[in-house]
Image: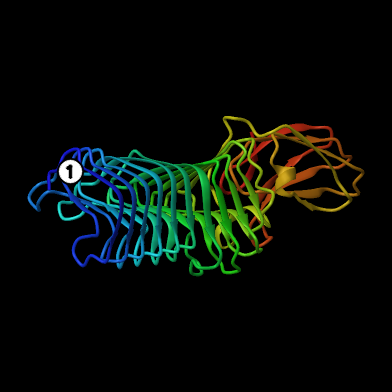
């Protein structure tokens, strides 16, 4: 209790029935390295020095350790802990979370966690759980696989944040149907992933990346992959915000991005490729999503689209461009069906007939009124949430 500059080096610790196999209340500059801790109620707990004090552990360094098989959590980073460092740490097969970052008896959120090469697999609830307003958390090369509830969950009162760079978030069918493999839920909750591979291989309907109830998520240069045609890659609901950046791409899956309501916000930078999903940007329950697609970085390039003498529903690859140029010999006015997101596009009509630009919903039904672009005309159009309008 209140220990300073203590070191636990090269040890095997197991089977505690108390607070934890390794319990540090209010320590400063503690070093835990080359320790294998297993079984017991918890295998590692950073707490406070007594129930009336809110000062938690400061500058705890944990490296080259395993924390496996606890009845509850592998590691609980509790009340007021600051500047915790995890390097080459494994937390597997625990009865609750692999790593839980949360207030305990005194409701003081831990802050400032950094880590590199952290693995959380086969835990009975969450791999990495951040609860309440714990912020400034960063993990490089985070691997979370087959944790039953979610591999990563950011949520709770006040929101928390996690930045992950590199690594793998994977489910092979352990996560229950309609659950989220990674999720940020609650106002202020943020999940930022860079160069991470999100992968689901089971056949059940799951969400690889879910934002709910005011959560925010950013994926930069990430890959979201489903081995089957089921499930949602990115789901946005409950007035949440999703930003896809860089070279983020989708492979497989039924829905690429599914937005629930007009209050959900979606931004897709020009370099992203969402064409791998069956429906790249889709509409909840057959209704039109009014999520704004901000294009300050610009939709990429020009697509030249030859038309047969029939109506056409554009694919994501065709639609996702700043300029759409149509050609072909037509026998009558034809409908060009586009995605129901707010993006300004230039339409160049070099056919011999008028084109009606109109939105199609997720059930394949035309919704709202379209706008006509005459033969030989160049016209900017935009979906305003109800209709396609000339701008």
* Residue 255 sits in quarter: bottom right
SS of the residue at dot 1?
loop
Q: Residue at x 62, y 65 (%)?
A: 230
Expressed as whole percent of the image width and height from the top left, the position of residue 224 reads 59, 51
* Residue 135 sits in quarter: top left
Q: Nearer the viewer, residue 312 or 221?
A: 221
The total number of labels drawn is: 1
Expressed as whole percent of the image width and height from the top left, the position of residue 342 reads 58, 42
Tag 1: Cα neighbours inside 10 Å, few (<14), some, or many (≥20)? many
Which quarter shows the C terminus?
A: top right
Q: Identify residue for label 1.
A: 27
Q: Residue at x 16, y 55 (%)?
A: 105
Please determine whether, in this image, residue 345 is positioned above or below residue 90: above
Q: Say left or right for 217 vs 67.
A: right
Residue 302 visible within the image: yes
Expressed as whole percent of the image width and height from the top left, the position of residue 251 reads 66, 53
Q: Say left or right for 343 vs 61.
A: right
Please determine whether, in this image, residue 315 is positioned above or below residue 364: above
Q: Say left or right for 140 vs 59.
A: right
Q: Residue at x 19, y 61 (%)?
A: 19
Expressed as whole percent of the image width and height from the top left, the position of residue 85 reads 33, 41
Q: Nearer the viewer, residue 361 or 78?
A: 78
Q: Nearer the viewer, residue 111 or 93?
A: 93
Q: Residue at x 42, y 64 (%)?
A: 149
């Amino acid at each position: 209790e209140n220990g300073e500059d203590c070191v636990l080096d090269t040890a095997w610790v197991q089977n505690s029935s108390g607070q934890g196999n390794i319990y540090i209340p209010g320590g400063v500059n503690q070093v835990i390295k080359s320790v294998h801790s297993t079984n017991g109620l918890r295998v590692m707990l950073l707490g406070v020095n007594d129930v009336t004090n809110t000062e938690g552990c400061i500058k705890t360094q944990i490296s080259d350790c395993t924390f496996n098989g606890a009845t509850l959590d592998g590691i609980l980073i509790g009340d007021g802990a600051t500047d915790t460092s995890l390097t080459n740490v494994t937390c597997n097969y625990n009865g609750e979370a692999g790593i839980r970052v949360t207030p305990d008896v005194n409701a003081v959120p831990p802050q400032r966690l950094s880590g590199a090469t952290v693995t959380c697999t086969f835990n009975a609830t969450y791999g990495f759980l951040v609860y309440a307003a714990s912020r400034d958390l960063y993990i490089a090369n985070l691997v979370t696989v087959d944790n039953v509830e979610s591999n990563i969950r950011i949520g709770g009162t006040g929101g928390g944040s996690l930045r992950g760079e590199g690594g793998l978030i994977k489910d092979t069918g352990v996560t229950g149907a309609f659950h989220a493999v990674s999720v940020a839920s609650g106002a202020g909750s943020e999940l930022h992933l860079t160069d991470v591979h999100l992968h689901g291989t089971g056949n059940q309907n799951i969400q690889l990346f879910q934002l709910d109830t005011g959560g925010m998520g950013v994926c930069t240069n990430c890959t979201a992959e489903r081995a089957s045609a089921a499930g949602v890659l990115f789901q946005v609901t409950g007035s949440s915000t999703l930003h896809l950046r860089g070279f983020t791409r989708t492979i497989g899956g039924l829905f690429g991005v599914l937005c629930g309501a007009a209050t959900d916000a979606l931004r897709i930078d020009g370099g992203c490729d969402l064409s791998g999903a069956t429906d790249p940007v889709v509409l909840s329950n057959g209704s039109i999503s009014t999520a704004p697609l901000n294009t300050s970085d610009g939709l990429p390039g020009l697509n030249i689209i030859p038309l047969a003498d029939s109506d056409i529903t554009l694919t994501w690859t065709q639609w996702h461009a700043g300029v759409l140029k149509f050609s072909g010999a037509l026998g009558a006015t034809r409908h060009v069906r586009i995605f129901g997101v707010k993006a300004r596009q230039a339409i160049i009509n070099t056919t011999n007939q008028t084109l009606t630009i109109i939105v199609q919903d997720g059930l394949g039904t035309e919704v709202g009124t379209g706008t006509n672009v005459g033969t030989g005309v160049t016209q900017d159009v935009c979906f305003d949430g109800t209709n396609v309008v000339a701008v």
